[in-house]
Amino acid sequence: MTNWDSRALAVVQQLRRSGHQAVLVGGCVRDSLLSIPPHDYDVTTSALPWEILSCCAGFPCLNTGLKHGTVTVLSGGLSVEVTTFRREGSYSDHRHPDQVEFTSDLTDDLARRDFTINAMAWGPEGLIDRFGGQEDLNARLIRCVGDPDRRMEEDALRLLRGLRLAGQLRFTIHPDTADAIHGHASQLSMVAWERISAEFLRLLCSPGAEQVLLDFPDVVTQILPELGPAVGFDQRNPHHRWDVYTHSVKTAALVPPSPALRLAALLHDVGKPASFFLDERGIGHFYGHDRLGVPLAERAMARLRLDNATRERAAILISRHHLPVEPTRRWAGRWLSRLGEECFFQLLALKGADASACAPPLKAEESAPLERAEALGRQLLEENACLSLRTLAVNGHDALKVGLAGPQIGQALHELLDHVAQGELPNERSALLSALERYLSP
Ligand code: ATP
Ligand code: MG
């Protein structure tokens, strides 16, 4: 069927040569059947952990997960997670099994896995599919192994894994599994924020994110309660076809899939419900929602344990998403140098998506200035225009020599950079030195 990575197969063969059962299992089988290159390999085996270590003695092994029955075997640079067949007991904390029991029966091990498409195994004799995984793969369905209600009740992370897989593969969630996800959404509170955050960002950046986020606002608002008031919030405005939540999800789905940009898009109107007012004609408006929204978004991102760079970038994009765009070199130069290259293009993408997700299709008179500003930005970069202090023809030493001191130096250099980036001053040393002198107090 597929081209298995020979390094992963070498581990399976090694265990089998020692008389154990061993198969590839889970995501690597699912992805291979879909012709997607697997990004990690799991092997499940009847060998007990100490037996795995002794059989695989020829490979470097990391036994960090040994007490849970997992050994990481490094085969030709590929890390392969090898786990003993297991059956899991009850789950009283909605996340971890109370006890794990090793078994010699592969079917038990497959039965504890979350979804049918993740419960297939592959060995040299072919595909082992005890729960209809291949059929669901062909039907593009995410379906729990066994009773969905019980499986979600056991481990609430599964509900988010299900949504993430549906988004990544653009699969549909089987109605019974979807019901169980809705029914157990509140149990996400039992899952560590780091795990929630990792799965949620993968979902948000997935190709099928729009449908999943629209179908499961109850799960999304468990993770981002700040979006709760946006769900169903009618903007009472002819430019807005959708409620605030739907508009935000559609905006997020239209921007390129980077975490900071997609989060900014999802949260860009989070301040709207609190800043809403109706005019005398009964049309809805918002006052200062960007200002209200930034602290709400920051709170949400801190809860998701995001790194500072992602948080800062998303906050800048949200706070600037109403920046008026002028299709001029002057405007492009100013904002390229103030925001930096990546943030500049992300802001234009966010503004374009925001406009498209209001009252599609985006009218030419709305999209033309954005496209022009983007083209001008690219042109300035191609011309190697001076857009940062690094390439400015004068620096701090020059400012000191001229007689400037302390905070005056940074301020003067930033102002000169603004003039140069906007094309109002040439990036030439002599012109900039005289400009620096003008900062000296008379
Ligand atoms: P990917 O590697 O693309 O993130 P995956 O399905 O391979 O997706 P892993 O975290 O690598 O995810 O898990 C490997 C396998 O372990 C899964 O395919 C599934 O069979 C099983 N598994 C992982 N997490 C759970 C869980 N919470 N409940 C039940 N089975 C799980
Ligand atoms: Mg995997």
Image (tube, rainbow, N blue to C red):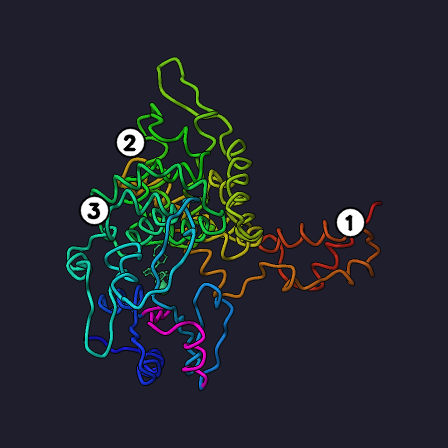
Marks 2 and 3 sit apart, C-alpha to C-alpha, by 29 Å
Report the residue marked by disc 2. Answer: 241
Question: Between residues 184 and 385, which one lies in front from this camera angle?
Answer: 184
Q: Amino acid at mark 1?
A: Pro
Report the residue marked by disc 1. Answer: 407
Q: Earlier in the sequence, mark 2 or mark 3?
A: 3
Question: Between residues 195 and 226, which one lies in front from this camera angle?
Answer: 195
Q: Residue placed at 81% from the left, 51% from the top?
A: 406
Q: Residue placed at 37% from the left, 48% from the top?
A: 90
Asked which quadrant contains residue 21, the reply is bottom left
Asked if the magenta segment contains residue 84, the reply would be no
Q: Amino acid at mark 2?
A: Arg
The tag on residue 174 is: 3
Q: Earlier in the sequence, mark 2 or mark 1?
A: 2
Contact (CB < 8 A) between labels 2 and 1? no
Q: Is residue 48 above or below residue 304?
A: below
Q: Residues within 10 Å of mark 1 (few under 14, many from 20)?
A: few
Q: Dot 3 lies on which element?
A: loop
The magenta segment is 38-57
Q: Amino acid at mark 3?
A: His
Ligand 1 closer than 8 Å to the CB at disc 2?
Answer: no
Asked which quadrant contains residue 58, the reply is bottom left
Q: Position of residue 55 (x, y in %)?
A: 41, 82
Q: Residues within 10 Å of mark 3 (few under 14, many from 20)?
A: some
Q: Position of residue 103 (x, y in %)?
A: 33, 65
Looking at the rendering, in which quadrant would you find the C terminus? Answer: top right
Q: Residue placed at 34% from the left, 80% from the top?
A: 15
**Which quarter of the rendered image does ligand 2 occupy?**
bottom left
Q: Earlier in the sequence, mark 3 or mark 1?
A: 3
Q: Residues within 10 Å of mark 2 (few under 14, many from 20)?
A: some
Q: Is residue 99 above or below residue 214?
A: below
Q: Dot 1 lies on which element?
A: helix
